[in-house]
Image: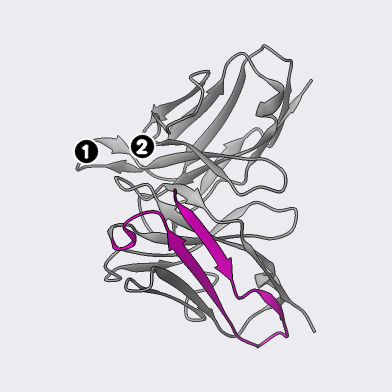
Amino acid sequence: EVHLLESGGGLVQPGGSLRLSCAASGFTFSDYAMTWVRQAPGKGLVWVSAIAGSAAHTGYADSVKGRFTISRDNSKNMVYLQMNSLRVEDTAIYYCAKTEGSSWALDYWGQGTLVTVSS
Amino acid sequence: DIVMTQSPDSLAVSLGERATINCKSSQSILYISNSKNSLAWYQQKPGQPPKLLFYWASTRESGVPDRFSGSGSGTDFTLTISNLQAEDVAVYYCQQYSSFPHTFGQGTKLEIK
């Protein structure tokens, strides 16, 4: 059974940093691209970043480019999101999601971790 | 960036009736290699993460009831829910994965009339 567990969220001041982690199990991790999606309270889904299975290919939303870095450790079945220069507007639930395999569609999602950026 | 626009923003449909949600991309999302459109549909219920319904615009994810259907091509796509059930109340999102960033539509809230 596929399982994704996010951690690392919390309260941080504007300008601060956080590193989110996502522990994956139940599938051959290195075979699948992984994605981070966020959702501000009461708002819609926003794609944040993705990384290919080999880590050779990454992508970012314009709103986080240059501030966030996605990475993965295939030996540990982990994907990370390093978030620097955090802004109030980065406040959201951050979901880790696995890609479907034949496409970049997201077939399994974690329960999310809440990031709150506030002074 | 490709902009995904859903319509309507919300709709109310009677139980047993049909609900139709539209999604329009700002440019073609056709994947030349397999001649399929790089579009996914998700359902999100309150307090839950999203659930994948369709990918490649019309390929139904395992376990999704066949009263859900996905269609469309080019830049115009549709999610249709036939014989609406109470458990279908949710927010529905389309997403393109043709090119980074893999943008979502703004969501359509489906309620029971």
The chain to which mark 1 is attached is: B
- Residue in the picture at 68% in, 27% down: B87
Can you see residue A61? no
Q: Residue B40, how many percent across, how many down? A: 45, 40
Q: Which mark is residue B56?
A: 2
Q: Which mark is residue B34?
A: 1
CA separation in Å, label 2 and label 1: 10 Å
Looking at the rendered structure, the secondary structure element under dot 1 is loop
Circle 2 residues within 10 Å: few <14, some 14–19, many ≥20: many
**A51 horizontally vs B41: left or right:** left
What's the residue type where badge 2 is placed? Trp
Quarter-of-image position of residue B85: top right
Q: What stretch is highlighted in magenta?
A: A1-30
Quarter-of-image position of residue B89: top right
- Residue in the picture at 67% in, 40% down: B45
The chain to which mark 2 is attached is: B
What's the residue type where badge 1 is placed? Asn
Work out whether residue A13 or residue B98 is closer to the camera in this orientation and state it: A13
